[in-house]
Image: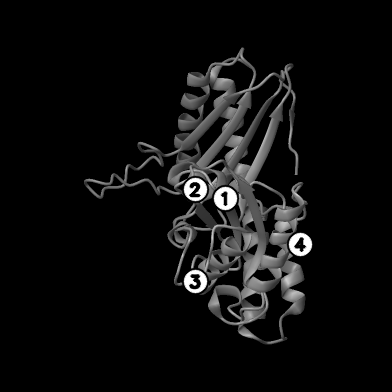
Amino acid sequence: MHQAEDWTKLLVEVIAAATARLPEDVTAAIRRGRSQEAAGSLAAMALDAILKNADLACSERAPMCQDTGVPIFWIHHPASLSTGMLVHACAEAVRRATAQKLLRENAVDTLTGRNTGNGSAPGIPSVHCEEWDRQETKVELLLKGGGCENVSTQYSLPDSKLGADRNLEGARRVILDAVHQAQGKGCGPGILGVCLGGDRGTGYHEAKRQLMRRLDDKNPVPELDALERRLFDEANQLGIGPMGFGGKTTVLGVKIGTLGRLPASYFVSIAYLCWAARRATAVVSAKGDVTWPS
């Protein structure tokens, strides 16, 4: 596959898979949360509605949410593929997916306030291409909605108000504060993608990249794995619950990565993702065969 048209068609399929199908690991996490909520509670009813909505979206091949978000593509490709072609194919795929009602017309011109009408605008979609030594191409897509983006946040350590120093304990404190401040907004239960380090821009990017991880994976760094598990338990003890209705299911997962930082800066970037974790991955072999890792 070297033609832009072939890639555009594939990318529309990737968008269709992301917008209408809730990943099975996320569905399993929601069901586990539902089993822990009291029968007849607002939390239980909210999770029941979420699961019903996800089933309907999948069966009807329709968007799970009216806010289909900013499409964020990460593409790893061999040197034989043109980055410019891939970027163009992503933009065209978004326009076609919007015309097919797989995505909603969510792109707005910032200066005029007018909807562009085709789902694309400067910076939408967000495309990140990286060349690698393999012959296959890996396409990853995250649809990041505006409601959950609004409660994403960034801290600069030390934070005297929270007693947070420049260490993992300080990071733990500000991440819990972010969950508390969200108070169920952003369509909770949410998933936290976190980056320790980096600058203000790269930190947020890596935090969103963490959201592509499966909820049931294990962080290869022991210290971060322990922190992820601790934060998951502690966040779900805050009593915020789904949509802020109270309960035991405040977050579905916590995923943490790190980047290098300057001596003067220690940022903790937190990308909050709503329960509609709309992500999809496709791997294209050198012969053009496509597989869909879960």
Residue 40 is marked as: none
Contact (CB < 8 A) between labels 3 and 4?
no
Q: Amino acid at mark 2?
A: Tyr
Q: Amino acid at mark 4?
A: Ala
From mark 3 to mark 1, how far is it between C-alphas? 19 Å
Residue 138: x and y, percent?
Answer: 67, 30
> Residue under circle 1?
195
> Residue under circle 2?
204
Quarter of the image with the N terminus is top right
Residue 177: x and y, percent?
Answer: 52, 70
> Residue under circle 3?
162
Contact (CB < 8 A) between labels 1 and 2?
yes
| Residue 54 visible in the snapshot | yes
Q: Nearer the viewer, mark 3 or mark 4?
A: 3
From mark 4 to mark 2, how far is it between C-alphas? 27 Å
Q: Earlier in the sequence, mark 3 or mark 1?
A: 3
Up-down: is 198 above or below 251?
above
Q: Earlier in the sequence, mark 1 or mark 2?
A: 1
Badge 2: residue crowd in 10 Å (few <14, some 14–19, many ≥20): many
Question: Does residue 45 appear to the left or right of 34 in the view shown?
Answer: left
> Residue under circle 4?
28
